[in-house]
Image (spheres, rainbow, N blue to C red):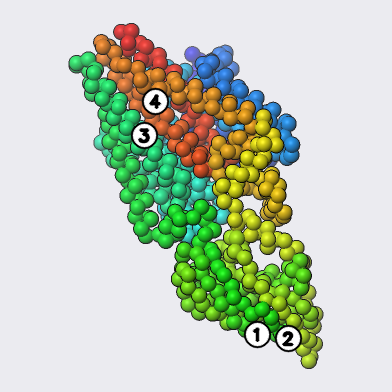
């Protein structure tokens, strides 16, 4: 092997490790623009990594080989993506772009499969460990940022603004996302990191490394809990529970091993999984006991349930043009959390000026009045609200609206407005005419309320309607967010001035709606192929006589087989409640996990066959 070929070989794997450790750190600002295509730093890193891999294959004059049980379902998945995008009924350009991004993810998985297997049997385990370490270290750094984000939001906000447009909040409380763009994206990545750390813990002997892994598990578990992701907590608890049971099952089977062989490292897998389960469970319990926001989220489907109000305002007012006065408004807290009258994000009472027909918003930002005190759930308070009358005499409608300062208007969380009819009289001394801001349609307020009230089951109903219209290839990759409101017959449901970002909140529902039955079949084919071969390996009875080195190596790979299977599983469980194939960090992580699992299956099949033969 020439020197340049050896360098390219090492460089290809170092590029993969660099990609893995950088997954949590996608910058908001793109790095490269090529026509309609925009590349972030993470997408550019993935492209360069695959370019180095392609150069490696060219220098070695070798065409990568993948088992048929892997490339056939992946080929079917890719063909469905392309066909669905080209035949999309709407937003075809966006669908094609998304299909290309998805195919890049598939290619990254195939790349990792090839690089792992062609490292040679002696280096396979080392490369698998190094890949897990790389992503776990990046995820742990992001978790530290996520914890700091909740504890010291003012200090960390300027630094984290490079990675996301805004902080994820619910009812004003910060949901940890660290360097990820959104809390649920962070939760998905941190769940996978915890499973990989469990596997590393079960296959690492140096005490110092075990302590480091334990510390990382505590940090990432804490960050995961602080994301307030219900799907994330369910997924990690279910997956670690499965690892505890499956690891114990492997342990019992290995008691049949021939005498004289060393104890399998997988014996520690149940303990590692159990310790992680208890860490997440205890931290989650503490967070639930201390956080009213978490308690409220467990009681309602949508996060907007913490902002609920009723208004009892005067039915009619007479005001003098251009004069500020006060009006009594009785407001009732119908949410599960108290309203705070002070602090960084207090609840304030304000209003919007509408025309008499309630068709146009004449003035959106009204005076803001501080509440006279905190308002507990189901309690009421009378506020003497400041009101500045329009400068022009006439008939108007005063639309009362609460807001949480720096967070959101209550109307954008689905709360109905309070209304007061107003007659504005001319002043004895006419005021100069003040220019008004451009009018908005009053339907903007209705649309905001509709967007605030979108529950998961409503989105699934929209997905069902879209699938019925296009059952075979769906509405096109990533097109659910463009079409769900139309499927429900909503008017003015799209956000003004920005593309819609709301997905169906389920991996499986999104695939059905966007890729149709063909996509569901291709996806299920891939998962069943992996699951069948992994189960056959785990269920294979241990050899009655075996070579010491070959059997010990096979046991090590069985532990990794369980760990990588659990990494895929945690995605699939969380996928019941959220969608992750849209976001660069998670879709790359998903396909890297698929490629690693497929490589582990292939390598373990060969090793166990050799162990049984010997």
Q: Which residue is mark 4?
A: 561
Marks 1 and 4 in Cβ contact (< 8 Å): no
Mark 1 / mark 4, whichever is N-terminal: 1
Mark 2 / mark 4, whichever is N-terminal: 2
Residue 527, x across and y down, in percent: 50, 26
What residue is rendered at 41% in x and 27% in y? 128
Q: Which residue is mark 1?
A: 325
Q: Which mark is residue 469?
A: none
Mark 3 / mark 4, whichever is N-terminal: 3
Q: Which residue is mark 3?
A: 242
Residue 286 horizontal side relative to residue 411, left or right? left
What residue is rendered at 66% in x and 41% in y? 465
Indicate the secondary structure of the residue bearing disc 1: strand
What residue is rendered at 57% in x and 19% in y? 72
Q: Which mark is residue 320?
A: 2
Residue 361 in view, yes or no:
yes
Residue 43, x across and y down, in percent: 59, 37
Q: Residues within 10 Å of mark 1 (few under 14, many from 20)?
A: few
State the CA–CA distance, disc 3 to disc 2.
70 Å
Residue 158 horizontal side relative to residue 490, left or right? left
């Amino acid at each position: 092997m020439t020197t340049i070929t050896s360098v390219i070989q090492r460089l290809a794997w170092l590029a993969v490790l660099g990609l893995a450790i950088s997954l949590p750190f996608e910058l908001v600002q793109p790095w490269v623009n090529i026509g309609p295509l925009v590349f972030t730093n993470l997408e550019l890193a993935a492209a360069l990594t695959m370019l180095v891999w392609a150069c490696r294959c060219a220098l070695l004059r070798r065409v990568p080989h993948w088992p048929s049980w892997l490339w056939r379902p992946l080929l079917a998945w890719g063909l469905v993506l392309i066909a669905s995008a080209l035949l999309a009924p709407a937003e075809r350009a966006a669908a094609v772009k998304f299909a290309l991004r998805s195919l890049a993810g598939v290619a990254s998985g195939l790349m990792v499969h090839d690089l792992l297997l062609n490292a040679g049997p002696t280096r396979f385990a080392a490369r698998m460990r190094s890949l897990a370490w790389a992503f776990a270290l990046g995820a742990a750094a992001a978790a530290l940022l996520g914890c700091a984000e909740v504890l010291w939001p003012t200090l960390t906000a300027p630094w984290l603004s490079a990675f996301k447009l805004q902080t994820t909040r619910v009812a004003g409380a910060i949901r940890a996302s660290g360097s990820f763009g959104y809390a649920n994206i962070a939760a998905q990545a941190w769940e996978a990191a915890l499973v990989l750390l469990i596997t590393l813990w079960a296959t690492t002997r140096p005490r110092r490394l075990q302590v480091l892994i334990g510390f990382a598990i505590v940090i990432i578990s804490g960050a995961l809990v602080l994301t307030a992701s219900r799907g994330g907590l369910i997924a990690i608890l279910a997956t670690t529970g499965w690892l505890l049971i499956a690891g114990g099952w492997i342990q019992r089977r290995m008691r049949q091993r021939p005498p004289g062989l060393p104890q399998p490292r997988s014996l520690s897998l149940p303990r590692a999984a159990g310790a992680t389960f208890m860490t997440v469970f205890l931290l989650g319990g503490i967070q639930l006991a201390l956080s009213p926001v978490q308690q409220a989220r467990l009681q309602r489907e949508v996060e907007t349930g913490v902002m609920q109000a009723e208004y009892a305002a005067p039915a009619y007012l007479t005001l003098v043009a251009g004069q500020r006065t006060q009006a009594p408004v009785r407001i009732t807290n119908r949410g599960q959390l108290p309203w705070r009258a002070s602090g960084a994000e207090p609840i304030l009472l304000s209003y919007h000026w509408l025309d008499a027909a309630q068709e146009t918003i004449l003035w959106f930002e009204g005076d803001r009045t501080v509440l006279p005190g905190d308002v507990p759930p189901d309690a009421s308070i009378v506020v003497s609200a400041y009101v500045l009358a329009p400068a022009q005499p006439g008939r108007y409608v005063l639309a009362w609206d609460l807001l949480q300062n720096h967070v959101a208007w209550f109307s954008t969380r689905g709360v109905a407005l309070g209304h007061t009819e107003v007659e504005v009289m001319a002043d004895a001394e006419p005021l100069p005419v003040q220019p008004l801001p451009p009018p908005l349609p009053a339907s903007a307020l209705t649309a905001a309320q509709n967007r605030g009230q979108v529950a998961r089951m409503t989105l699934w109903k929209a997905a069902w309607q879209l699938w019925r219209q296009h059952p075979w290839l769906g509405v096109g990759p990533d097109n659910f967010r463009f079409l769900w409101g139309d499927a429900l017959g909503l008017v003015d449901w799209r956000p003004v001035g920005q593309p819609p970002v709301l997905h169906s909140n389920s991996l499986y529902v999104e695939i059905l709606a966007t890729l149709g039955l063909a996509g569901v079949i291709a996806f299920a084919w891939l998962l069943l192929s992996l699951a069948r071969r992994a189960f056959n390996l785990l269920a294979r009875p241990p050899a009655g006589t075996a070579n010491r080195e070959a059997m010990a190596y096979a046991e090590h790979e069985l532990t990794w087989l369980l760990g990588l299977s659990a990494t895929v599983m945690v995605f699939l469980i969380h996928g019941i409640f959220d969608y992750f194939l849209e976001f660069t960090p998670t879709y790359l992580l998903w396909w890297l996990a698929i490629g690693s699992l497929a490589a582990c299956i292939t390598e373990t099949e060969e090793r166990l066959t050799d162990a049984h033969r010997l």
